[in-house]
Image (cartoon, rainbow, N blue to C red):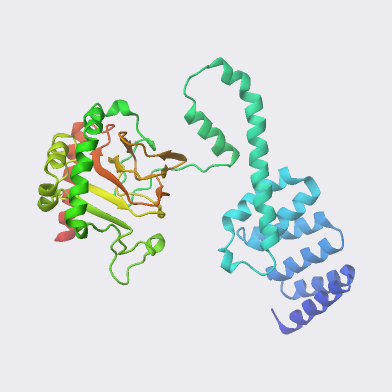
Amino acid sequence: MASAGAELVNEAMAALQRRDSARALTLLGQARDQAPDDLEIQMSIALAQRVGGDLRGAVASLDRVLIADPYHFMAMLSKAALIEQLSGPKAAAVIYKTVLKIAPPAEHLPPGVAAPMARARAVVDQHAESLVQHLDARLSEVRGRHGAQSLGRFNEALQILSGRQRAYVSEPIDFHYPQLPAVPFFDRSYFPWFPELEAATDMIRGELEGAIAAADADFAPYIDYPAGAPLNQWAELNKSRRWRSLWLWRDGARQDAACNQCPKTAELLSRLPMCDQQGYAPTALFSALEARTHIPPHTGSTNARLLVHLPLILPGPARFRVGNELRAWRMGEAWAFDDTIEHEAWNDADQLRVILIFDVWTPLLTEAERDLVTAMMLAKRDFYAS
């Protein structure tokens, strides 16, 4: 902004301090003539219009800013507040929702916006709650027609539509196999061998406890990034034994020392249809999480495989979330989930929690697809190795 324009803006702000919005608008109009592309002058015009009671004019001025910069945070926040005054919270909720999406991190918010941001969150939350109540009331008769059928998937869709939950999709780190549904937890009917695994819980736990007693030092930190690597959400757990693992198979290689320590477990796993991908799978491990420890949200490598969990040591409450579905582990119950959907875990108990984890092919791939995926991944590895 040219110095003359800056002086005009300063005079306008002084006029606004005196509640003289007419004088402020005159000065800001002159400043805009000198710098027609200066968005901050346009923001000041919107402020002067708001002080003078011309709320619709202020919205029009903010829209001009947003045409030039659709992600202008303060313009969007100011517009939402004005729309709430003019048309009520229902009309403002959609704009407030956008505000929350584009807002900078809390530590970088402009001064004085904490209260408006709290209002934005309150309006968005109340709007979602009101919409859910409205939809529930309107759908009660239709729900009644379908009796006791499982409607969990539809219920989640309703929550997503209302804005109370978000839609989770498969986000593999390494390889995405197309046209596979993003299913958080797979139905047990895909895994007829689950009863054999679950029946072995006591045996596996006994060998695990022996391994902990004999060689707890062999349990290595699960997160082990080298110095200089970006840690992101793993800063607290990197190289920490608060989340540590004993590997039975790793990247397709049998870990003989651990398997010899737990021979019956290793023999059982070798009979189960673990994922078999030279250089990549199977993977099988005991995952130990210390008391009051949280594994932050993350995603896995490929949706061509699933992970199986079997709880072995559960000293108290422990939770696991995949997408929008939150479950508690129960002794003697296994599940299989798609780890390329965002997931996280909590050990809320005061003692160590341990889970047996291993990977299996997703049951939605044919034998031919599994063979081709394996060959493709090996070819990829060789390409980068040469």
Residue 282 visible here: no
Drawn side of residue 14 relative to residue 349, left or right? right
Quadrant in which residue 226 is drawn: bottom left
Quarter of the picture holding the C terminus: bottom left
Q: Residue furthest bottom?
A: 3
Q: Is residue 72 above or below residue 166?
A: below
Residue sitting at x 10%, y 51%: 256
If the image is split into quadrants, where does the N terminus sit?
Answer: bottom right
- Residue 124 at what x, y percent from top left? 65, 47
Q: Is residue 297 visible?
A: yes
Image x and y of residue 104, in percent: 57, 63
Specify whether 90 is left or right of 386.
right
**In the picture provided, is 12 more to the left or to the right than 148?**
right
Q: Residue at x 18, y 40 (%)?
A: 372
- Which image quarter: residue 2? bottom right
Residue 212 image point, x, y percent: 21, 52
90 versus 14 height, above or below:
above
Viewer-closest of 288 and 113: 288
Please name the residue shown 27% across and 32% down the image: 363
Total marks placed: 0
Measured as percent of width and height from the top left, residue 39 is found at 68, 68
Relative to 351, residue 230 above or below: below
